[in-house]
Image (cartoon, grey):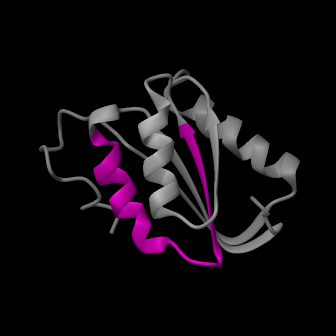
């Protein structure tokens, strides 16, 4: 896939909870477009269906695999480092990740973001 180096929007998404991924991707899909690059980090579960879901929803994307370690910051730093090494820039950056919390009810995906 050809990637321009400058985008208007850069969305960094961490995908660690398999049962929440489709809702999470649906919430991010509202940002899809020619000026948006999505960079995803996926955990070590069965990747094929997740990659297929990403390919169906997003025009421009990169996918990495890095374990969920370091209280969420490790994976974010990994992706930021990869983006900087590739020379990718953007006017706006959104960092989002699926999150399981005892403070959120099931079905509240994206309500606090969008």
- Residue 54 location (% of width, % of height): 49, 52
* Residue located 77% across and 41% down the image: 81
Answer with left or right where residue 5 lies relative to residue 75: right
Indicate yes or no whether the magenta region holds residue 18: no
Q: Is residue 37 magenta?
A: yes
Q: Residue at x 61, y 27 (%)?
A: 66
Q: Which residues are magenta?
A: 20-41
Quadrant position of the C terminus in the picture:
bottom left
**13 with respect to 82 (left or right):** left
How many discs appear?
A: 0
Q: Position of residue 1 (x, y in %)?
A: 74, 58
In the image, is 73 to the left or to the right of 104? right
Residue 112: x %, y % from top left: 28, 60
Residue 90 is drawn in which quadrant?
bottom right
Q: Which residue appears at 87% of the width and 57% of the height?
A: 87
Q: Is residue 76 above or below residue 54?
A: above
Q: Residue at x 39, y 55 (%)?
A: 25
Question: 64 or 68: nearer the eye?
Answer: 64
Estimate the x, y position of residue 30 in percent, counting from the top left. Answer: 40, 73
Inspect this view and state whether residue 96 appears: no
Among the 4 quarters of the image, the one containing residue 15? top left
Q: Is residue 79 visible?
A: yes
Q: Is residue 31 above or below residue 108?
A: below
């Amino acid at each position: 896939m050809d990637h321009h180096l400058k985008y208007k929007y850069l969305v960094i998404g961490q995908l660690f909870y398999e049962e929440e991924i489709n809702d999470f991707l649906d919430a991010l899909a509202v940002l899809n477009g020619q000026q948006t690059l999505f960079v995803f980090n996926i955990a070590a579960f069965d990747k094929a269906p997740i990659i297929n879901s990403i390919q169906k929803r997003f025009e421009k994307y990169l996918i990495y695999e890095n374990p969920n370690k370091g209280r969420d910051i490790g994976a974010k730093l990994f992706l930021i480092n990869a983006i900087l090494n590739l020379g990718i820039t953007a006017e706006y950056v959104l960092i989002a990740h699926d999150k399981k919390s005892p403070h959120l009810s099931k079905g509240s995906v994206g309500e606090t973001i969008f």
